[in-house]
Each structure stands twice: as C-alpha cells, then as structure tokens.
Image (spheres, grey):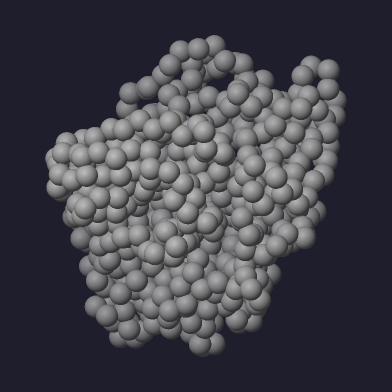
Amino acid sequence: MKAFSFFCISYLIGGVLWAQLPSNIYADAAYAPFLYGVASFDPTDSQVILWTHITPNNTQSTINVNWEVATDSNFLNVVQTGTVATDSTKDWTVAVDVSSLNAYTTYYYRFQAPNGNYTRKGRTRTAPAASGSSTVNHLRMAVASCSSVFSGFFNSYQQIAQRLDLDVVLHLGDYIYDFVDPDEEIRVPVPYPSTPTTKQEWRERQRYYLMDPDLRLARQMHPWIVIWDNHDTDYNGSPTQAEDSRAAFLEYVPMRLVTPTDTKKIYRKFSYGSLVDIFMIDILLYRNIDNLPSGEPSILGTSQYNWLTTELQNSTAKWKLIGNQKMMCGWSVANIPPFFPATIGNGSVLDPKSWDGFDGSRDRLLDFIENNAINNVMVLSGDAHVSMAADLHQAPTGSGYNGSTGNGSVAVEFLPTSITRGNFDEMGYPSWVVGAVEGYMATANPNQVFSNIVEHGYGILDIKSDSAIAEFWYMDILNATTNQTFERGLLLKDEENHWHRTPLTTPTSPKDYNATITNQKKITNRVKNTTELTVFPNPSDGQFSITFSLHNSQELSIEIVDVATGKMLQTVLQQRFKSNVQHKVELDLKKLSAGSYYLRLKGESLETGKVIVIQ
C-alpha cells in the first residue's frame, strides 16, 4: 500500500467536511461562487454545451446565472448572451446548449453570478462542417479513460489542457470512481471516501473530482465528448439508485441525449466535416439485454447495433471512429503460463465482460464492416488500464489474417492506457513477469501490434486525409510533474485497415500554430539540441517559469509570438547559455493581454517553443 501525501486543513465544501485534503486538491476559491470551474461538451458544427456550478448562500432558492460567448479571450466581440436559472434540483449546476455558432471556430465563454463575479474564461471549439469554408483535412484529438483521483496525480490532464491545437477530448469511461482501490491509495482525503449510494453522494463525488485543478483546466480549455462506464454510475443498483447516479453524472458531465427523457440512451454521433465521424457507443447498459439471431447474448443490444451499422454504412467521412468502453481485440489467456495471475480471466479470455466474452457480437460487427467494404474504421477503447494497438479480425490466428503484415485486417483498435488507474505495476508484479506477460500476449494474439501493461498517460490521434497516427504518451502518477514521455506513434494509412509495424519515434507536430507563426514559416523543433522545454504554470496570470538544457552552448533569444497573427511581439531575453546545464528562467508577461501566445526559443542550432496561455 502506497503512502499518503497530505496537507492538513479543515475544509467544508459541497456539504462535506474534509479534515485532510491530499496534495493538489482544492476548490477554485479565487472565482467564488464558481468553485468548480467551467467546461464544454458535445460540440457540433453549430452547437456546444457550456457548463458551470454556482455555490449558493443560505438564503437562495433559485439563482439566475448570466452567460456570454465571444470570439476573443478579452470578450470584446461578444456574439451571444443569455441567462439560465439553477436550483437545488440541479445541484446548482448550469448547462446551456448554445446554438447558431459558426463551424470550426474557437470561442471563449464565461458565466456571471448575480453579485457580478465571473467564472474563469472557458475555451471551446465547434466542429467543422461537412462542406464549405470550414471543411478541414487535419484534426487532432486526445483520448483518455480510467481516471481515479485517488490513484495518482492528474498530470496527463494538465498536458492535455496545454495542447491548444486539440479539436476535442474523448473520454471513454470511468471518468470518476466509486471506490478507492486499497492498492492505489496515493491521494486519499480524510475521512476515507465511501462508495456513493444516493444521488447526493454521487453529486459529492463529482464535486470532489472537480477540486483537482488539472481536471478543471482540461475541462476549461477543450470541448469534451464522454461516455460512462461501470465506476461512473450505480448501474447494478436498484432502478432508483441507477437512475439517481446517471442523473448526477449528467448534471456534471452533460451530454446531448438523442432522447432527452431516456438517460440510458447515450450512444450518439459526432461529425467533424468530411474527415471524421465519431460514434460513441455504450456497452455498459446494453450488454445482455438482447440476443443475437444465433441466440447468443448481445453486447450492443438490437437497437444500438442497428443504429451503429446503419450509421457506418451511410457515413461519407474518410475515417470512422467508434468510441467504446471495452477492449475489442481478442486477448486470449488459454494455456497461460503459471506465473500469470490466476485470478484474471475465466480460463479462456482476459475479461468475459468485454468484447472477448461476446464473440458472436464482435464477429457480427466485423463481418458487417468487411462485407460492406467499409474502410478506415478505428475502435477507441478504455477500461483495461493498459496500452494496446491491435488489428481487428474475426479469427486473428487463422489463415485469413497475417500477423506479420496486418493483411486481412478489417479495422484497427487504439487503447492509450489509464490516466491513473492501476495496472500490472500497481499489482506488484516484478519486471520480469511484466516482460514475460507482454511477450506471451504478443505470441498468443498476433493481431496485437503494441502493448504495455505498466505505464499511465493518454493518447493523441492525429488524423489527415491520407493517414491517421495514434500516439502513446506516458506520465508519472505518483508525483506532480510536467515531464512526459512520448512512447511511440503508430501509422494507419487510408484504406489499408491495419497498423504499420514500424513504430514512429518522433511525435507529430502541433496542428495549427506552427503553420501560422512567423508568416507561415514552419518552426522546426530540433530535439537533438535541447531537452524538452517545460513551462509552468501554464495557463497563468503572466508569471511563467521555463526550464531547458542544451547539448551545445549557444546564444538564445526568448520571443513571444501572437498565435492568431504570427507576429513577433517582443524579445524578452537574449543571452548565451551553457550546454549540459539545467537552465531555469523566470518570465513576467503580465503586461500582455489575456490570451494565447507562442513562447519561442531561438538559437544557432535550435528553434522550439510552446503555446502559453495568460488568464
């Protein structure tokens, strides 16, 4: 059992008295009564759901909250405003589905309390339209799942927040956790959290999660598309308990339900121009409710299967992404070596509640994709707490599929790993067992192109007309850090339907900013000449601390560039720096207006930088 890391205070928030709060857990008191930040969800080419929570005083029964949307972070060009009421029946949450927005446009938004106080400024982005001036041929997305606030630090969320070129964040379930794993007690408050059983307790768990500033920041900086999984709701409880837990989830993580009165029906489609269609499906509430024509249990249910296959067949987008909670590729554990944990799997497959336990459903969907010649299908998965990239085929050990080349594959799967939730490392297995298990899995499952069963982090999808690249990014979860590791990228080419076997060792470049900075001149990050540039905190009020080291001594200039125009605004420092020394430079940029800027290090043999945000 791992040690606690606490700072001691008495803290009453959301009706719960915390005697001790873990490190990096606190409400956003500077923006009271908006203690839990802002967020945006379910973007389309003309709509996005904006969210906040307001804490009432003891005399208020209803609160009217103003909201406004602008095209600039200074709110000089406000394009829409409104007022929405909230009360205790909504747990004082505010959600407004703003429409009539321009396609593929970055917007800023904020809410205002009756006393005049504002929330932080949120940033969101609509999707591109299928045709017209907003049609795009390059999209970037973050993919995340399994984020237990008790199991470690949300360092990955901080990094996702700082990637300002992302179009959307996809969260594939277990956004919150109903329990504290006894083997992963890294950040646990006092009193010890109990498993929620009532709507109010689920609401309290949602608010507790939003006391993490990194989660708040990731929600503030990007639009999110989310599905739930087994730890997010009391899906096995009584009908009342199940409904209450779903209602609490939707109060804090709103979705644009296809049928507003049916909170069970969260499968839905998102179109990103002619480049990408995203189909978010739900296994949790549809597993075992229907049978297939063969009589086998269905993992999707009849109505959801019919919806998904119809949408896939009718899609005209280049790429079709299926976001779901469970791993689809087979993970056989038959004839498993004796060192493998005996408690995992059912003697045949690793997880009988995933697609592995529903062979008929998996084969039926893959048959449909293959028989209808639907190319460029990528399944995005969560839940398993591991990294996995795999080809998808009905019989990956049969003659119809070649594990060495990928020929015969019908679709592919990308599972980036868990944000914090434990895997084999937390289970206490030594490194030789981990290596042996990964080797055995690759042999037993030839369609697995890459696997890692110990690291934590998130994924990046970089999608263009001719290719899609899936990237694995890893971060420490035991300590607060800005250091991250690029593990590898995997390439999928148009209409090939299988991962390339040679991994990419260099991450893809940021999508928007390098193309517009310095009069369209592309900035080259010559990584051989510098270690990773880190900027902290980011966003900030203008005070930044940057660290870097050099392989070659040289004169460097530190420049600030306007992201929107590409214009170099100022040189804040110019001096010579030695090699093989960790340099730390403090910058005071408080005179700049709130907004996004590019911080550039430029020298004799390097040019690199990061997008910074001043609030």
- Percent position (x, y) of residue 131? 65, 77
Q: Name the one closer to the observer, 491 or 202.
A: 491
- Residue at left 46%, top 13%? 8
Q: Name the one closer to the observer, 592 or 88.
A: 592
The answer to whether 100 appears left or right of 321 in the picture is: right
- Percent position (x, y) of residue 95? 74, 44
The answer to whether 464 appears left or right of 487 in the picture is: right
- Quadrant containing the N terminus is top left
Q: Name the one closer to the observer, 527 or 129.
A: 527
- Percent position (x, y) of residue 60? 83, 22
The answer to whether 519 appears left or right of 230 in the picture is: left
Residue 64, image quadrant: top right
Looking at the image, residue 495 lies above or below residue 197: below
- Residue at left 57%, top 25%? 27
Is any part of residue 58 visible from this angle? yes
- Percent position (x, y) of residue 264? 70, 54
- Quadrant containing the C terminus is top right
- Residue at left 72%, top 49%? 77
Is any part of residue 150 visible from this angle? no
- Residue at left 45%, top 27%? 24
Looking at the image, residue 110 lies above or below residue 386: above
Q: Name the one closer to the observer, 591 or 349.
A: 591
